[in-house]
Image: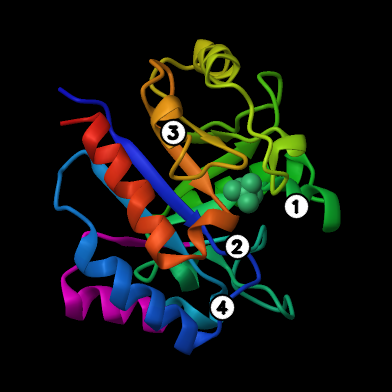
Amino acid sequence: MNKNIWVIANWKANKNIQEALEWLSIVGPEIPKKENLKVVVCPNFICLEQVAKEIKVGNYNLMVGSQDLSSFEIGAYTGEVPAILLSGLVSLSILGHSERRKNFNETDEVVTQKVKQIKETNIMPLVCVQDGETIVPEGCKLVAYEPVWAIGTGIPDTPENANKVAGKIKQSNGNLEVLYGGSVTSENIKSFVKQENISGVLIGGASLDANEFVKIVKECVVETP
Ligand code: PGA
């Protein structure tokens, strides 16, 4: 069977609801319906519900993810969004992104707590690591290797090295699916997804442009007939 190809759009702190829906109206109808193609859009919290609704109405082959969630359960935690409140709305949550580790002091312990919160739900954790050494919390099946120096710089890692690091990450658990992230575009995506140990990509900047994102997804489909 073909390996899964995950194409995950991380919009970060961008796009209001109107912009999100415009993006969806261009991207949604263009996503091929293939079983091993897992396309996920991760908007900010304010857009989640509308985006999820629009995907359902359009019957698009797209899933919705959050960019984070709380390490706490439901209760008196002002400003937090707990996993249980997101369940049913999102299929996946990006956890431990390097921007959260850097700007919000997120440690491996905090990430592990978040993965624990998710266990009570049907949300799939996508844990971001920066190398082959970072601890992958128990219960996590999807990991993104994202070297910090490659994020938003236009200088991606080489596909060969990304494959090597992905292989190392998989040594701890052969069932892990490992994605690559950092300056992925429609020009270079093919070279990453064709690597043996890489099961897709996490995309920031290039995912914001609807037409570029459609191109990226189509490149993956060409790669895995
Ligand atoms: P980038 O970001 O594609 O803009 O490099 C990737 C990420 O932060 O996940």
Residue reaching furthest front?
Answer: 187
Query: As shown in the figure, which amino acid type bears the numbered disc 1?
Result: Glu
Q: Which residues are magenta?
A: 49-65
Q: Is residue 189 above or below residue 26?
A: above
Give the residue pinned by disc 4: 15
**In this rendering, would 139 be left or right of 74?**
left
Give the residue pinned by disc 1: 99
Residue 69: which numbered mark, if any? 2
Contact between labelled residues 4 and 3, with CB atoms less than 8 Å apart: no
Q: Residue at point 51% right, 17% down?
A: 163
Q: Is residue 70 above or below residue 162?
A: below
Q: Is residue 90 visible?
A: yes
Residue 141: which numbered mark, if any? 3
**Closer to the eye: label 1 or 4:** 4
In depth, the one of 118 and 146 nearer the eye is: 146
* Cα–Cα span, label 1 and label 2: 14 Å
Query: Callout 4: 10 Å neighbours few (<14), some, many (20+)?
Result: some
